[in-house]
Each structure stands twice: as structure tokens, then as C-alpha cells.
Image (cartoon, helix red, strand yellow):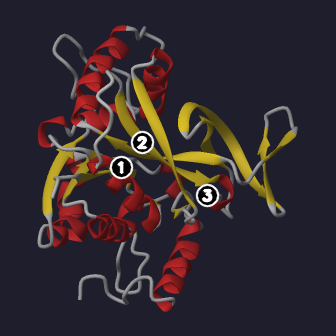
Amino acid sequence: MKKTALVIMAAGIGSRFGKGIKQLAPVGPAGEIIMDYSIHDALEAGFNKVVFIIRKDIEEEFRSVIGDRIEKITEVEYAFQSLEDLPDGFEKPADRTKPWGTGQAVLAAKKVLDEPFVVINADDYYGKEAYVKVHDYLVEDHPEDGVMHICMAGFRLGNTLSENGGVTRGICDIEDGALKGVDETHNIYKAGNGAEERREDGTAVPLDVKSLVSMNMWGLTPEFMEILEKGFREFLAGLDGEDIKKEYLLPDIIDRLIKAGTAKVDVLETKDTWFGVTYQEDKASVTAAFENLVKEGVYPENLYK
């Protein structure tokens, strides 16, 4: 069996969630958090290693809430995202407080990854289908054609909206099953049975709820880490004194690879419903959703009994 890893980005500050660490908020009937279900689904799909990307200051609580438990059922590694974790020759700007972004988060795991891996957000529930499709893709043989073959789980926009406010989604441009680009679209709200983008000028643009969007679930290879490392140096070298909030983001990096013709990103459609804790008010609906999944027999009442 090929080794494959689940990489969970859990270092986010979660400012919109309010007090507490939103990634560690219990939502399951036995106190499970969203990550418990993600790990359960990934292991069931065939992944056999978990890498947690966290901040050093939450390590103790993180291990207590979930890490120590997961170490009993699979291989676990930790990576730490830090503002100060920069390549030789670079220093953190004195007034920089914003994290460097998802690209640097994944790069933090370079030392503990030498197998294909899927990247997810800690506070997102993706459903079972996506893990199966991404895992199967990662263990398949792909053409040796000088192009890096990676993948992305594509979710239908209508299955990714919040009842409690606007969300940002990367709406995908797809041709023959391959990603051509991602249009980062902000302030997307539910509108009746549809969805709309509410712009700053007061206008609302209807959106197709069947459009596929990126939820930051990528199937990547060790080769990608080398590109990520080189790109981070280039990103830092290109900053000026006023760029204290600019981020090094996975979608931007992958978009550049697509446009350069050095990567092919296959989009694997899933019809599962995404849900996550973006706003404090989302927690009640997410808890209710897991209750229903348990009642329907999708999950046991206690994942680790």
C-alpha cells in the first residue's frame, strides 16, 4: 500500500469566530471536533498518516483535545507555522502580524512529508466522497510527460454556503476536467434557492449554484514542496515595505503553475455538502448536521469507542 498523508492546516487565528480556538470547538455527539470526522473519513479512504500544521502557542491544548487521541490510531506528525519561519536572508517585518498564508503553512510541513498528500482546512467538513477520489488519484500512475499531475476536489457552490453571512469562494474555470483558473469571489450569499455576489457598489450578481468551487482541498506531491519553497523565496523577495498583509497562497501558486504549463490540475467533482465554522453562529447548524449524519448511520455515535 502506498503511503499517503492527510495534511491539516490548523494554525488559523479564527478572528471571525470570536473567542476560543474554533478548530477545537466540539460539534459531535461525543464531543468530536470537525477534524475528528475529517481524519476518520481520510483513514477510511486509505490515507495512513496525519500531519497537523499548528501554531506553537496552541500545541499543548491541541494535543490534549485531539492530537494524543489520533496518535493511537495512525502515524502523526506536527509542523509549526510561524511568522519568523523564513528562509535564510529574510526577516519578518517589525509590523507584520498577519500569517504568511496557506503556501507557507504547507511549506512548514516539508520536513515531515515525503509522500503524496491531501491538504485541507481544519474547520471545514468535506464529506467522504472527496477523500476517496483524491486518495485514488494520488496512488494512481500518471503520465511521465514533464508536467506535474495534481488534483483538487471541486464542490458545487450551492453546497458550500453559510446561513449566517457571506463567504469567499474560488469559482473554478474548468476545461476537459482540468483546472484553468480560479476566480476568487467575495461576499457570496444565499439568495432564495440560488446564490449571489454582493458587490461594494450595492449591486448583486447571480451565481450558478452548480458551479464548482475550490475549498482548499488539494491533492499534491513531494515535488510540489520544492516548487513551494522556491516560490516562497521569490514571494518574499518581491515584497516592499507596504506589503505587510500580502499572503503566499496555495491557489495563487497553483494558478501560476497552470498558466506556465508546468502542472495539470484535475478537478474531482464531489456532490457532498460542505459545512464549516466560519461564524460563531455556524456552530449550532454544524452540530445539528452531525447529529443528522449520526442518525442516518453515516457515522457512529462515538467515533473512537
Horizontal side, residue 193 vs residue 158: left or right: right
Residue 41 drawn at (x, y percent): 35, 69
Residue in the picture at 68% in, 51% down:
166
- Tell me the residue that label 1 is attached to: 137
- Estimate how packed mark 2 is, as few (under 14), some (14 to 19) or many (20 or more) residues with alpha carbons within 10 Å: many
Q: Amino acid at mark 3?
A: Thr
SS for callout 2: strand
Q: Nearer the viewer, mark 1 or mark 3?
A: 1
- Tell me the residue that label 3 is attached to: 160
Report the residue that reaches farthest toward the right: 203
Which tag, 3 or 2, sits closer to the chain's start?
2
Q: Observer-nearest residue: 230 or 68?
A: 230
Can you tell which quarter of the image residue 289 is in?
A: bottom right
Which tag, 1 or 3, sits closer to the chain's start?
1
- Relative to 60, is 185 above or below? above
- Determine the CA span between mark 1 and mark 3: 23 Å
- Tell me the residue that label 2 is attached to: 151
Residue 129 drawn at (x, y percent): 45, 64
Residue in the picture at 88% in, 38% down:
203
Q: Observer-nearest residue: 245 or 233?
A: 233
Q: Observer-nearest residue: 33 or 296?
A: 296
- Quadrant of the drawing holding the C terminus: bottom left
